[in-house]
Amino acid sequence: MSGRAKLTLFAALATLLTSWSLNALVDSQAWLLQAALLLAVQSAVGAGARRVPLARALTVAAQALVSLLLLAFLYAGKGESHGDGPLAYLVTDFGALFGQGVRDVGEFAIPAPLTDGIKLLLVSGVLLIGLLVDTLAVTLRTAAAAGLPLLALYSVASGLAGGGGASWFSFLLAGCGYLMLLLSEGRDRLAQWGRVFGAAPRRGAADSGLANGAGGQATAPVKFGRRIGAVTLGLALAVPAVLPSLGGGLLGGTQDAEESGGGAGGTISAVNPLVSLQSNLNAQDNRVILKYRTNSPQQADQYLRILALDEFNGVKWEASGRALVDVPEKLPEPPGLRAPVSRSAIEVTTSISAADYYTQRYLPMPYPATSVNIGGKWRFEPAGRTLVGDQLGRDKFQNVQGAEYTVRSLLLKPTAQQLQNAPEPDPAVQQEYTKIPDNLPTVVAETARQVTQGAKDDYTRAVKLQDYFAVNGGFRYNTRTASGTGPQAVARFLADKEGFCVHFAFSMAAMSRTLGIPARVAVGFTPGEKQSDGNVNVSMRDAHAWPELYFEGVGWTRFEPTPRSGINIPEYSRAQTPATQPSAPAPLPSQSAAQPSTGPSTTPECPPNLKKLGECGAAAPAQSTGGGGGPSVTTVLGWTALAVAVLGLPLLPMLWRTRLRARRLATGEVLTAWRELGDTAWDAGVLPDEALSPRRAASRIVDLGRLDPEPAAAVHRVAGAVERALYAPPGAEVSYPELADDVLLARTGLLASADRLPRLRILLLPRSAARISWAFAARRSALASAVSTRLTAARLRLPLKGRG
């Protein structure tokens, strides 16, 4: 194996060993094998391009192109499609999956589930670092500089993972990979120097001065380099362990959460109030985040609600933009609540205290609340009946962290008969909360109609939908299922029949809207676990999402389609239902939800969450993508141009030679035509030799090119014209009309004498294309010389101080 091939191998190995540190960020290592295979292909493409050889820029471009194509074909179809055809399959889905991975990174706790989006980010990141390392270490022959991208990769992984017990092992692998890369480059450089004098060989060993003797013993420089690397790596691992003050950083873990006042894992905060459910459902740390005491006679129905997601825009459910108002002493009447349900309602009091490490801007409280007593700056959103922390300053917001507050709320007891006889909802409510996106798959509405077939009223349809998910539809609760976004997520869930509360709430709400039932999704906490002292503890795994359906006279009513152990199905959805009575779901392996929280991700002008709720003025209209429109004209033209550029890249050398040949032959000059004939022979494998006379050079082209008599005669005629141009007296005519035809005839003969593969190489990868790099080098040298001359002249013109 050549020195450059070994350097390529060790560059890929160094990248792969460093990428091991990324394993701490996800809960599965399945992505690493795929990254290793793609990295091997990328390195092989680079090795082949350098062996051709291609220019450095073309080598890097070829590696990047092949890597992008492999990623597109591997991950296309796993994102949300917004069009049909191969363009949507290979491009739109690929970009959507990349964006989903970026969102998953910000929404999931570490170690995050290995979703397709996160897997794409990991693999593409490793390929990018691998390309940089290969370019610096092999293409540019500066292996020491290749440590910078390796250090960046390790630093990002270590910083996000927060160090830990396995950090020293990751550092050891990364350090060994980098040292092996340096050693490989050093041996290659030593081999290029020739004979190296080292220590005297051992008795019986063959006399050799190369880096490795015949007996396999390394010489003194190589041994010394190994020892330096081993000592340096050992010190890097040992010194932080000996000196406690160096315990942090890239090798050490972060400060213990107990010392930082954050409990077992610091503060709890998330960006998205819904998607973050999954990361906490799978969290091993189940901290208590809320404690409350209530006088409710039905503590099992005491859900703590955070906010309502009432807008399904075709991509996700989210809270629509609404104006916020000051919190009134007594909250307004709940929408839709009328007698006789309101007369049978009981007002209960709940005292709640939040943990110091729970940073939540939305206030958890029972629904529907009638009054809230809490300190701090809060705003009220009337439609969703939620309290949101106000802005206290730049990048600082009121939150529930460590708060103690009291909520008075209504315990509603609607009966199945009241819900079944509910009148038609208010037209405004009906219009707003039954909107569905145009690109919602038809299978959603068809399944809803099939499940509710025979039902005469909205209540019966709602119970049938709940039973379909929770009891008789064959669905299984699994927190490891990717949450997903977009209209296809609902269709995929109905087909796979596996998911967690987000899937069930989303799907039932969407199906209810297709049936004309006003619906939205609520996010909050299940009642929690009652303690012996009368308090109720709500932990991270008690967070939940459920659908709320609107019935006139009752208002927004909770349903429970999630088949999870410990979930309490409302009494009104079990009694006197036309369908099979939904009993408690069979226990399945489950973990309850965690805190859905909105961390204060803001801009100086306006925080996104307040902008979403209307605090900053009119909210931007929701964007809904059409289902059958396909990609836009701009997208099609852009990707068509990219495809043409990608396909035309391998043809650039051939196009350059064709244009250059036409320009040379159009001049009619003999010496220019002779230069073109020499380059044509060079492309065919006849290396140029400037020391030969035109006649001997022509004979060499004829012999090595195995030309037939007619093309051979054309070569000799061109050579004769060159001799006349060089030695004829001034004013003599040296050119002839058939000069260009003779050059083309000679080229045809050279192509005809070559086999199929060599002929293809002559056309696509002509050797004379090396003149491009020579021209660039010459221009760079001339420019540097001109700049140096001007600087020298400027210094000479400067006046000398102290003269005379």
Image: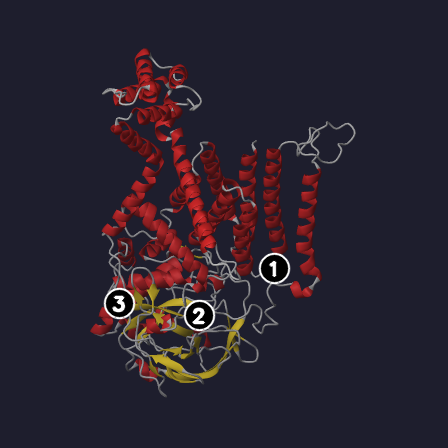
Position in image of residue 565 (x %, y %) = 47, 63
Could you tell which of marks 3 and 1 lies nearer the N-terminus? Answer: 1
Decide: is 98 above or below 33.
below
- Hey, what amino acid is under mark 2? Ser
- Hey, what amino acid is under mark 1? Gly
The quadrant holding residue 273 is bottom left
Could you tell which of marks 2 and 1 lies nearer the N-terminus? Answer: 1
Q: Mark 2 sits on what residue? A: 597
Badge 1 crowding class, 10 Å Cα cut-off, few under 14, some 14 to 19, many 20 or more, is some
Q: Is residue 692 visible?
A: yes
Residue extending farthest to the front is 804
User: Label 3 to label 1, Cα distance in Å?
Assistant: 45 Å
Residue in view at x 69 percent, y 58 percent: 239
Residue extending farthest to the left is 427
Q: Mark 3 sits on what residue? A: 621
User: Label 2 to label 1, Cα distance in Å?
Assistant: 26 Å
In depth, the one of 755 and 634 nearer the eye is 755
Position in image of residue 502 (x %, y %) = 40, 62
Position in image of residue 173 (x %, y %) = 61, 49
Could you tell which of marks 2 and 3 lies nearer the N-terminus? Answer: 2
Q: Quadrant of the N terminus?
A: top right
| Badge nearest the viewer, 2 or 1 | 1
